[in-house]
Image (spheres, helix red, strand yellow):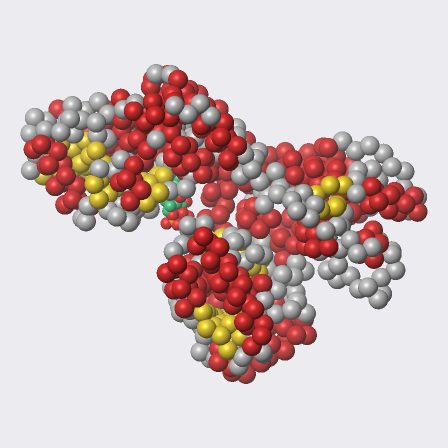
Amino acid sequence: MAKLTDMVDMEIQGGVAVIAIDNPPVNALSAGVRTGLYEGVTQAVADDAVKAILIYCKGRTYIAGADIKEFGQPPSGTPLGDVIKTIENAPKPVISAIHGTALGGGLETALSCHFRVAVDSAKFGLPEVKLGLLPGAGGTQRLPRVVGVEKALKMMTSGDPVGADFALETGLIDEIVDDLVEGGLAFANKVVSEGRPLVKVRDSNEKLEEAKKDPELFNNFRKSIARKTRGFKAPEAIIQCVEDALTKSFDDGIKGERERFMGLMSGEQSAAQRYYFFAERQANKIPNLPKDLDQITVNKVGIIGAGTMGGGIAMNFLNAGIPVTITEPTQEPIDRGLGVVRKNYERTQKGGRITAQDVEDRMGRLSTTTNIEDLADCDMIIEAVYENMEIKKKVFAQLDSFMKEGAILASNTSYLDINEIASATKRPEWVIGLHFFSPANVMRLLEVVRGDKTSEKVLSSSMAIAKRIGKVAAVSGVCHGFIGNRMLAQRGVQSQKMVFEGPMPWDVDRVIFDFGMPMGPFAMSDLAGLDIGWDKESSKGETVRDVLCEMDRRGQKTGAGYYNYDPKTRQKSPEPKVEEIILEFSEKMGKTRRDFSDQEILERATYPMINEGAKILEEGISYRPSDIDVVWVNGYGWPVYRGGPMHYADSIGLDKVCARLKEFQEQDGDDFWKPAALIEKLVAEGKGFKDM
Ligand code: 3H9
């Protein structure tokens, strides 16, 4: 066996040069892999004894893409373009044998091979769009030539991988094999013995010609993804590259792809999305955990409460194959909750994402009881009852009396004090907060709230279970509203204040929406319901919210709140009466109204969040700034192309944010704006959050 680099070696087996890549954890295309591949193929081509070349990866996956850690570093090793050309132009058959995930530059490498085989669990994708990039090693030109234009557009603009069956059907692979290396070798020998012509994807134009027959293809495609890709630059760049594939030569198409790739790579969006990629992975890591800490195995989950939250939470576990028992004191809410869960599954089935059998399997894992003590042998309990401290404490005291030892006792509270909840038990070290976001079966974020006494074992097991059920978890300490809702509250305070000084709710909402959030604070209040925490009996019309609720404008559910909602389309439109009410309040408060620029609205809404984020870090509520960003991107729809509020602050320049906070402080005469000590400190040191 010849070692080509420390990541690649080659062995000749019966006339086939077998090139093996070994670059854990995901066989990324680091310099050593590229150089090794180039050397291996070059040597194999020059060796008369070699009839075919087989490329495969050791470990858990085929090449999962370019090495993202190398981006922005000075170039080293053989450029990927040279590797790809050398493979494609090899005069002997080159075959990739694929397992795990062939992603990004990995799939592009495979597409430069003349043939591809894969095991049936393999997945294939070009996920560069998720990093704010486009496939930059020929993917935009080769994939449409193989799977067809529309399918390629879908794969590249969503970034989602496809399975082996789809790959076989579309010609992305030539054969499914049982054993990676044996199957790959057998295929290579077959190609040689049959004298099969070498397939160069670059020369296959039939599927491009087919697409040319539909002149509306690109326009229709743009329309179909417009809502999902609003604000992102990479999807449009991908579409333009594919348009090039239809109208230009292959080489010119590659040139255009390169230019657009470099443009995106040096832009702010990709920088934010690459930052975010690592942020999400880091968020799952708890600092300073003992290495030998054993985990609690969760094989059975109990959920208290069959409401929207309880049912949604249950679905996460059922989907991951973990049995759940839901309890309520009476049968009626259980039946209602179960009906909702089933309906949700059936809707997913109608959408084609799961089968009827999947629905039954998942429902089959769900059991119910009206006797809470039936949950005694569960490994984890999640309490999802009404958001009230006294009720929660009662539930936890009761749990403490019958739950088996070693079970995780979790509360789904969205802002209450976990320490106080834990104090109702004699085992506070087993108590933790698991704040699921609504709808709990859809939203990816899980805020894991560590109480002062929560044990490391319970915390790390909760992070592991979060990963198992497909959630993105971030740890928060105990404070009112934890990371997300605590910061949201600050935005709320300023949004409410602003409307008495100049802009109307729809102005604020438009600016926040254009910034990339799914909706602004007033639309969000309408969605949540303006009457949360409002009481008809005691309401005295002291706030705009009171007045709106008194008028039965309680938000979307009543067809009106800050906005009017069309009963059919649910489209919102501003209501002149609301404007009148706000103007009256302004006057009563003695405010002089003035024009606000969009920039000022944006700063007034987002800078308090950044300031609060800094306080959250200062107090040790969050381990790292990037965890806060993970919360905001996954829990509140902060546009990932802006990285999250803390990354956003760094991208503006923390010194500029700090100076602006001080300006607002002076202008308002309000200590609300006083920059957090951490911000002052970082600025004084010439640093940003990224340097923490
Ligand atoms: C590209 O290819 C550009 C080309 O078109 C053009 C070039 C010219 N690089 O996610 P996990 C690390 S762009 C470096 O927890 P999983 C990751 O940080 C690239 N490191 O595992 C983590 O490290 P740590 C296109 C990477 O099993 C560890 O591996 N490709 C890379 O849940 C495990 O990761 C992609 O965008 C990388 N490319 O999921 C694929 N990938 O342990 C990105 C991972 O220190 N990767 N790491 O925290 C993924 O989607 C998932 O990692 C994968 C495995 C599905 C592969």
Please provide percent x and percent y for residue 578: 82, 45
Quadrant of the image containing the N terminus = top left
Picture quadrant where residue 424 is located: bottom right
Q: Quadrant of ligand 1?
A: top left
Please count the marks in the image: 0
Q: Residue sitting at 61 percent across and 70 percent down?
A: 385
Q: Is residue 253 left or right of residue 559?
A: left
Q: Is residue 166 left or right of residue 48?
A: right
Please provide percent x and percent y for residue 269: 53, 33
Q: Residue sitting at 54 percent across and 79 percent down?
A: 370
Question: Can you say whether 143 is above or below 7 in the image?
Answer: above
Q: Is residue 28 left or right of residue 330?
A: left
Compare residues 255 and 665 and report the one nearer the observer. 255
Q: Is residue 360 left or right of residue 631?
A: left
Compare residues 529 and 594 and report the one nearer the observer. 529
Please provide percent x and percent y for residue 195: 10, 29
Question: Can you say whether 183 is above or below 372 in the image?
Answer: above
Picture quadrant where residue 505 is located: top right
Residue 413 can be seen, yes or no = yes
Question: Can you say whether 601 is above or below 291 in the image?
Answer: above
Quadrant of the image containing the C terminus = top right
Q: Residue sitting at 76 percent across and 47 percent down?
A: 562
Please provide percent x and percent y for residue 615: 67, 51
Residue 525 can be seen, yes or no = no
Q: Residue sitting at 25 percent across and 38 percent down?
A: 173
Picture quadrant where residue 18 is located: top left
